[in-house]
Image (cartoon, helix red, strand yellow):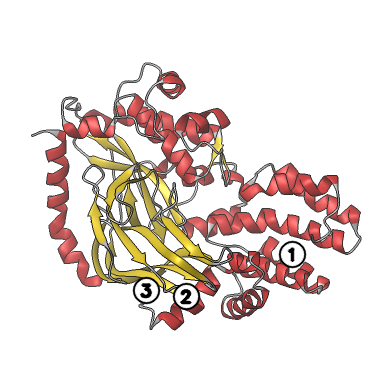
Amino acid sequence: MDGMKRGIVLVCGMALWLAVGAAGAEQGSYWYAVDHVTTVDEDARMVVWATLPPDWHGQAITVGNIVPEPVGVFRDPRTGNRVVEWLVEPEAGNPVLSTFFHYEFDFTERPVRMAIDPAAVKPYDEDSEFFRTYTAPETWIPVDGPVRHRALAIVGGETNPWLQAGLIYDWIIGELVFEIPGPAGRDAASVLDARRGECEQFSVLMVAMCRSLGIPARTVTNAWTTGGDHVFVEFWLEGYGWVPADPSLGQMLGPGGGGFGSEDVTSIMESRNVPLGDPRWLLGNLFDGRLVISVGNDIAFDSPTLGRRVTLHSARPGGDRARPDGFLIEGLNDDLVHGGFFVFGRRLADEDEAHDLTHHRLADRFFDVGMVDIVEDVCRASIEQDAAGVTPWLNMGRVYMHKGQYYKAEAAFKRALITPSAKRTERLAGLIWAHNYLGNLYDLMDRRDMALAEYQAVVERGNNFRGAVDYAGRFLEEPFTGQ
């Protein structure tokens, strides 16, 4: 039986558990909103692509309603992903303020915990289709050149795939800096050269290094049930199947906390049922509180709408999160707001509720197009409902600063600095961008010395999270004026 068939047997062997586990399924839905549409030209159209969550060895999934009626659902035979394609062609001169694309699902999550005995790992069938697929190069995943040279140097004389993967995992944790965004080049060679990146770039580098040594590997993308998405690694061991590894999250379990304080690390890990103190726990074991939404990279399908083949190097799960873009919006006003998000634990009542939730989830984007009143309303509601949220405090501070209520803005930004969060990127925003916004605020208040101290704090932290260091450097040179 070749490697591809072995993979099928494992999936089929999981089916009995999945069917039994589905009784306790949780509800969820994915929404992609196109909002604040004010003008519609001739031949306007909105095309959106998104992956449908797969059946996977750590979850059971049943996809329900897909709204509006899609052009089609297409399966990429190489990765196994299914992609839904939507097309809406609004009537010229008759703008509908909001359009929603969504699908519903029920899923059951299974803990993924593995104990690996290196001596029990069997040799690969290197002639199998499975082996060739998961050791081949892809757009972001080179298997030769600097990546292979570094991988060989890391593993030295070690030949056991489990132990090799562990050495690569340790090296990535020790050498890379977590930063959003990472280098402009998303490929493993660029990440290796920059020695920094976000979770997907950590994972792409580990996959490329594993493949370069003949270890089948792939990236896996999940949505957190608490919000946001994440990318980790799976590599294949004969006799065990797909083994998870998460170097970017694992880095937080080391002595430096991945740049986070102990309270933040504790909050983030407890929400995912990850024990503290051992980075290696996330090599062979997987966090909880996730829905896998795609596996692998270079997800390809034929689009009837475009009449050509589309390849998403990363779906995550689609729309504006995909690379290249998983959307095509033509003939509409430039200042519209669009983006996607998941909802877990319930069904939304209707599109009115979806519209309200869009304002919450995409508040930053509404602020960027000048819709400050919307942001103020949703931030105030969020703070009243959940005072622990970092993002509402940051956005409310920006609203107060925009309105000239400087002391209220100062209090909001300082609250964001000290508020814990189980969301890693949200906490980073609080630790870094709150300083930049305080610097802007103090400049507007003619307190230049205080502003410089805030910008310098960002520079000294050294994490260019969403361009924070570049932004701080700009206003170290000249004061912020609000323009």
Q: Which residue is mark 2?
A: 98
Whether residue 82 is visible to the viewer of this picture, yes or no, is yes
Quarter that holds the C terminus: bottom right
Whether residue 227 is visible to the viewer of this picture, yes or no, is no
Residue drawn at (24%, 28%), measured in percent from left and top? 119
Q: Image quarter for residue 439?
A: bottom right
Q: Image quarter for residue 114?
A: top left
Residue drawn at (40%, 58%), measured in percent from left and top? 223
Query: In the image shown, does 164 or 130 lie closer to the viewer?
Result: 130
User: Please, what secondary structure does the residue beneath circle 2 have?
Assistant: loop
Q: Earlier in the sequence, mark 3 or mark 1?
A: 3
Check disc 3: other Cα within 10 Å, few if <14, some if 14-19, many if 20+: few
Q: Amino acid at mark 3?
A: Gly
Quarter that holds the N terminus: top left
Image position of 366 (left or right of 449): left
Residue 185 point in image, percent of width and height: 52, 36
User: Please, what secondary structure does the residue beneath circle 1 have?
Assistant: helix
Q: Earlier in the sequence, mark 2 or mark 1?
A: 2
Q: Which residue is mark 3?
A: 345
Image position of 95 (left or right of 13): right
Q: Amino acid at mark 1?
A: Lys
Residue drawn at (51%, 57%), measured in percent from left and top? 268
Distance CA(mark 3)–CA(mark 1): 32 Å
Q: Which residue is mark 1?
A: 414
User: Please, what secondary structure does the residue beneath circle 3 have?
Assistant: loop
Q: Are marks 3 and 2 in contact (CB under 8 Å)?
A: no
